[in-house]
Image (cartoon, rainbow, N blue to C red):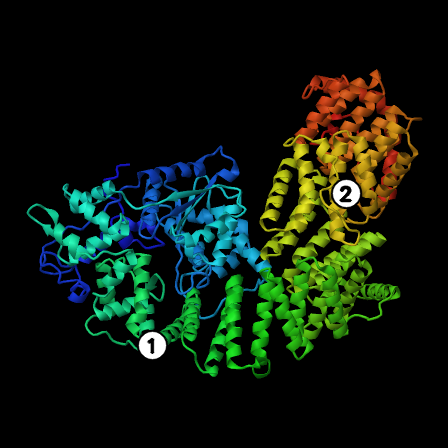
Amino acid sequence: MDGSRVSPLNHLLHVRTHDNINNTTTVAQKTQSHRMSLPTSIYTDDSSSGFSSVSDSYQFGNSTSRNLPPLNTCFVGRENELKELGEIFKYVLDKHAPNHEKSAVVILEGYSGSGKTELVSNFFLNIKTKNPALCLLTGKFDNLLDAASTDSFSAMFAALTSLKQHFSEPNGSELKTFQEDLEETLGEELKILVQLIPRLGDILGDGDGNDSDDESENTLQPETLENGRNRLRHLFLTFFKTLASETRPVVLFLDDIQWMDDGSTDLLHALLADESQNHLMVIGSVRGEDKYADRLDSLNKGLNRKIHKVPVGDLSLESIETFLSTTLRREDTKSLSEIFFKKTHGNVFHMKQMLEIMMHKGILTFDFAQYQWICDEKKANTGIPNADNVAELLIRDIKSIQPDIRKSLMYAAHIRIKFDLKLLEVVLKANGVDKIANLSLKEQLDSAAKAMILQHEEGSKMYTFSHDRILEAFRESLPADLGSNEELASFRLATGRALVEESKLRKRDSWLFFVGTKHLNEGYSIEPRSPENYLPQAQHNLEAGKRAIERSALKDASRYLQTGLDALKRVSETPWESHYDLILELSQRLAEVLSSLGSFTQGDEMSGEILQKATSLSDKLPTYSSLANSLGRREQHEEAYSLCKDVLYQLDAFPKHFVAPKIASALFNVKKLMKKHTNTQILKLPIMTDKEHLIKTQFLTEFGLRAFYTNRLPITLFCILLQIQMCFKSGLFPRAGQSFAAYGMIIADTFGDFVGASRMAEISRGVLKVTKGVFMEPIALFTVAAFIEAWNAPRNEVLDLLQGAMSSGILFGDFENAFRARGVKNIYAYVAGYGLPKIEESAEEVCRLCKQFEVEAILVMVSPFHLMLECLVGKRIVDWEFIGKTPPFTTNDKDPSATYRLYLFYLYRLQLAYYFGEFELAGEFIDKLEPYYKTDTTFTGTTMRVFFSGLASFALMRKTRKKKYKKRSKRFLSDMEKMMQRGGRNLLQKFLLMKAEYTASQSKNINESEQKVMYDEAIRAASRAGFTNDAALANELAGFFCLRRGDEGADDAGWYLNRAKDTYDEWGAHGKSQHVNEKSRGMAVNLFAGDSRYDSKVSSRRINNQSNAVAKWTHGSQDLIKHVTGVEAPDISLGTDSSRLSVNA
């Protein structure tokens, strides 16, 4: 790059709007023409500050002045930085890079005024020419009063809304496609995103940009605060994942991240940690001071990607000379460059400000004869005061501005870096400034824009301070201008009230309320006041805390609520007596927020104080609920169990002397009620409205859950039965949807009553609908799908239910249940024979999400399953030493979650060992699974355990002839038959295969023809039902059975194994297919995949040899199926067409 060329972004720091970098050149042109039209200078003749009158040869806006050329500063000295950014950007476009390398993270470090923002703007323009669809999103953090908690997410949300600029021409056609993609990805969650960021509605077609008189209520509130925070993070990540693509790479520029609030830090860290984010470049600018190092460390913590740090230092003397030569249209600038270097140290912004001051002092003039700028270098050396930093120079400059304009700008600086004319009028009026002597407010601001203090695009009502150092200088000047702390406090309070009131009229500008709140709190803190004056502060901070909670800004909420409590304690030494309701709500909300943030000790202390000071049980109940949830998050289930039990005793909702007969009585009552009422009558029961009864249902649910986690299953059952009885006594309630589902699960598992269970599933869904209990859908739909419908319902219906549970969980931020549903959906799809590659990809994604959102309970469920899938599809070579190792964790029989983890560890290793022929190892896993058979009663868990334990036992019985395995073989075959009898119609092909393999494992009386027919029936049943996995395994087992019969079975063995290999490949189990191929070669069997002549030859021989046995066996097996399942068996006869054995038939 030619460092001496004039930047296409003339006066970038002076004219750039922070959320509209793309239009900088146009804005610059408008601003330059605008500069020549103003009637006056904003500066006074103030000799005390070292400034004199503006030179006659150059006055801003002097109508008699000759038409001067613009003073165009240029972009120089950043060739190396631009090159480095360009090299980093290549990762974003590299199609062949690993996923986690298709995004880039850059931190620009440099002191204020070094030109970091201008560097990004020029970099973007460079890459935009080669990538027209490139999207730039920009946001800037502000340090108003307290950078950490002024307005959470403001810059992040501003970055998202800056997308509007990208989808204007020429990229307008992209908008509809993006809208459709986002709607497809987020569904109902899109409404939540627009509720959180109302101005996104202007872009996404869900708003017209106008404020509404009625606040849009969020009807999809998450049940817990941590769920809300999880949901916000998910929405943010999904938005970027949908936006950034190979054809539309995205650059996200966040300016001044040293002032980034805590909530934004969490979001940005999540974005950087998400390795699925591709085609995204994140650039953050940070001041180079050491005090901001902690902010960078928090971003870098735990990241599996490199953060590129690009230092942006001051310009060299050579670059300054180039800068001045181009700007002043002259070549002899060496001595002047040395003056600039001495006074500015090469700080870009400082140099531009120095040029402005030199023009105002008459040191810099324009010579029309030579058509170049002329500088009096002697006056430049002596007439410009030295400044150690930019802020000092700017403050000196501010003193020379006309008082009325200076005051307006100082007040504007306390709104935000970007503000509008009307808002400044509101603040001025609130502070008693109704009329300005000489100029209208607009003329004042336009004069400031002429002087490059503000940026303003012609025709716009928005103004932006041209640099944060200018903004800071005006802010820092206000206290001295006001003269006393009392005046400063009055200013803060008046400004705060005005902004809060204005926020009621501008509901889309939520930041107004929070900035107003910060002013109010600052005003109250400046000077001590009488106690009663602090009551409004306490009340307002409660409202601020509630609003922060609604947007999941929990750290902000904790600060607001704590400030409110502190203020209330100033009002009265005994606030629990004088202001009971106010301190109760402040304390309850703060305790919950602290616990949600992981500050458990503080949360427990606050909860203890509430339980001690609250005067009634109803006032204590929200704290009990929050505390129980907090204890559960810490896995202190015993303590949570005791707490819930104590509450239920106080509510008289649970018998103090619990004995087993009470369960039998409750079961009898529920059965009687269910027999007496139809589904329609149940769903027409009144809706429960009594607050006390609703609280009882909440604690019964929590108590039942804690009972389960502490291995008190009878109490869990009793809680479910109590809730169902409450429906008939007091009306339906949302949590009853899960109660009916859980009851259906119990009668299916305990009594084998799948008809009754299916009825409970139907009632459960109906209750969720009539009570609008959508927040209970994640767990209720999961229970219905995994424990009831999976046994009999069509596969697509089961998958749809699990998808619904997952979607509802995401919608409410209930990620544990959402990821559980997605994990079981993958497992069910595997058991049902769907294609393995997509299942493996989905399982890998679930593992990533569990790590990202720290959902350990589901990660331990999905990780061993994913390991097995990787081996089956061939992505991982089986490491038998690793597979055979003991689990890297301990278990406790009293902790069901730990037991379940151990169960899954062995369950998937059992399947892996069987698939790849390690039968002895599979037998060891069966032994280790024995104590945990009742741990998992889902369709998938039970089916996998019984099916593979049975097949492994058959193989070991055949190999060792030990009675141990013969006994087991009979038991597992009997278990599968019982599962069929209970209604497991989706198990037909597995039962037939187990029956065939069990018979083949006998040493005597094996009729080879009948045995082959048994395998063929299993293959046919699997093929017709679409269970590709079972069809492949049946072909494999049939093939090796034929091999064991000697040479006479070799041809049939080749035929079966050829089919097995092809079917495994069709399933996507390429690793298993390769294993069949290698094992067959080791046994001297040739596979002729795709050889129709071989298939035809062997098929004809097989059909002729088996024709006499087919009719007898088929008739007998169909009778058996009808006896076992209670329904007519499907037609699985082979006929004479061998192609009907194909999985594709």
Amino acid type, residue under disc 1 in the picture: Glu
Report whether 207 appears left or right of 909: left
Provide residue 106's location: percent of width, then percent of height.
Answer: 42, 44
Residue 635 location, quadrant: bottom right
Question: Distance of mark 1 from mark 2, alpha carbons?
Answer: 79 Å
Residue at 84% across / 52% down in the picture? 752
Question: 1085 or 160: which is nearer to us?
Answer: 160
Pointer 2 residue: 986
How crowded pointer 1 is (Cα within 10 Å; few <14, some 14-19, many 20+) is rated as some
Q: With 766 as the anchor, is 307 left or right in this view? A: left
User: Foreground residue, 435 or 778?
Assistant: 435
Q: Which mark is residue 774?
A: none
Q: Residue 268 location, x and y as percent? A: 48, 51
Q: Name the residue under label 1.
A: 487
Disc 2 residue type (three-letter)? Asn
Q: Quadrant of residue 882?
A: top right
Disc 1 versus disc 2: nearer the observer: 1
Q: In which quarter of the image is the C terminus?
A: top right
Q: Give how far across and how far down residue 723 sits, in percent.
A: 76, 66
For the N terminus, the quadrant is top left
Above/below status of 576 relative to 946: below
